[in-house]
Amino acid sequence: MSGALVRGAFLSLLRLFYPQVAVRGALPDGGTGCILVANHPNGLLDPLVVRVAVGRPVAFLAKSTLFTIPVLRGWLAAFDGIPVYRAKEGDTAQNERTFALARARLDAGAWVALFPEGISHDAPRLAPLKTGVARIALGCEGPVRIVPVGIVYEAKETFRSRASATLGAPIDVAPFRAQASSDERAAVQALTERVADGLRAVMLEADDSELWRGFVTVASWLVDDADVGARDARARELAHAWRSLSARDPAEAHAIADEARAFARSLEQLGVRDPLGLAQGRVVDPLRGAGRLLPLVPLAPLALLGALLGWAPYRIIRPLAERLAKGEIDVVGTYKLLLGVAVLPAWWLAQSILIAWLVAWPAGLAALALAPLTGYVALRWDERLTARRDLLRTGWLAATQADVARALSARRAALADRIARATLTASTP
């Protein structure tokens, strides 16, 4: 299978897994070598998100052990993978060749991407960076820029969730090259620290996972959650302000956190997913909302067929992926994608053979052709039904318990105002 076909197939699968990958920030102009550096929260799906975000060819550096896995070797070749050797896994002297290959691409004006933390992990903070980025950049002959990429996943192990990628301001390597002429070690360290600062500016960090999720949740109450990029940008602002506020006025910070948790519990009990929409009147009359379900009716038979043909593998992939991940949340998504590529086609083929044997071969061929198509219909049908059901639930609350709806809106506005004032105070020197 050609590299272009493999690449196109996996990028399409990434878009299927995460139907929305929002991109914020501008890419630098072409013609000059560029190193993309990104945080690494989600295994082998992170390179795919970076590739989708920049929309252009990128050579990825990846740990050498991945190249020894037959099922991944073709995938890595398709994305122009370059092996990196870590001390615990191989001879690090081979990295001189790795760095030379990367520099050659950069000097030719190509783009290279790597994950300087060196490991994929589920921690809500940036891990200490390796020095490879600085060593590669400082060793290039021509001009090179370093662009930080902050990746945020809504629920990285969840199929059909969303992601965002924020492109930071390019880091100019020239001043560090001047420093390297007199003290290379100090220049490497200084550039590595500058890269870490650049990454922290575009990624969402928190002291723990609960707080990280809280920033995303509260941001969804303050901006339109349909724009996942805007929501994640607001979550980053909240995180930066929270750190300042916690240092300046920890009592107020914890009071806001307690108020946000209480509001979240109220929303959950009432079944409201979009308090901002409720406040802005983005709800539908229950009768009109019921009418919006009508377009789904003609597709219901196809959706039901798709569910029947693909229900078993769809349900088995998640627990199997979690078992293979052995508690490491950051690789569950990777296993789910790879298992989906292997299990679903195998299931559809076995199913069609069984139908051909029990009924007739035309029926088996029809089942094989219809399974992926109707499976996609079932997926989209369920998503649209869920969205309309949420609108109906909120509309029913607004229509039957107007006082409760008004109280929720007022409470959200008060919380938003308190957060805004606290954010402004925290950002004031």
Image (cartoon, grey):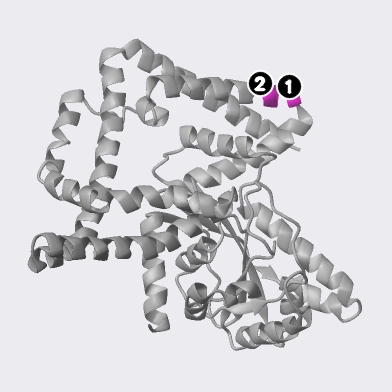
Q: Is residue 347 above or below residue 152?
A: below
Query: Is residue 65 shown left or right of residue 186?
Result: left
Q: Main secondary structure of the magenta part?
A: helix
Residue that numbered label 2 is attached to: 255
Q: Is residue 230 magenta?
A: no
Which image quarter: residue 144? bottom right
Which residue type does callout 2 highlight? Ala
Give neighbour class at mark 2: few <14, some 14-19, many 20+ (Cα, 10 Å).
few
Point out residue 87 in the picture as x, y percentages from the top left corner.
78, 72
| Secondary structure at numbered mark 1 | helix
Residue that numbered label 1 is attached to: 251
Q: In this orientation, which residue lies closer to the viewer: 402 or 328?
A: 328
Q: Is residue 207 above or below residue 67?
A: above
| Secondary structure at numbered mark 2 | helix
Q: In this orientation, which residue lies closer to the viewer: 162 or 409?
A: 162
Which image quarter: residue 409? top left
Which region is colored magenta?
250-255
Q: Residue at x 68, y 59 (%)?
A: 198
Give neighbour class at mark 1: few <14, some 14-19, many 20+ (Cα, 10 Å).
few
Query: Is residue 403 shown left or right of residue 21?
Result: left
Which image quarter: residue 105? bottom right
Which quadrant, please, contains the N terminus? bottom left
Q: In this orientation, which residue lies closer to the viewer: 351 or 333?
A: 351
Q: Is residue 420 above or below residue 16?
A: above
Mark 2 vs 1: CB contact within 8 A: yes
Point out residue 319 in the picture as x, y percentages from the top left corner.
45, 47
Q: Residue at x 72, y 63 (%)?
A: 195
Residue 150 in sight in this render: yes
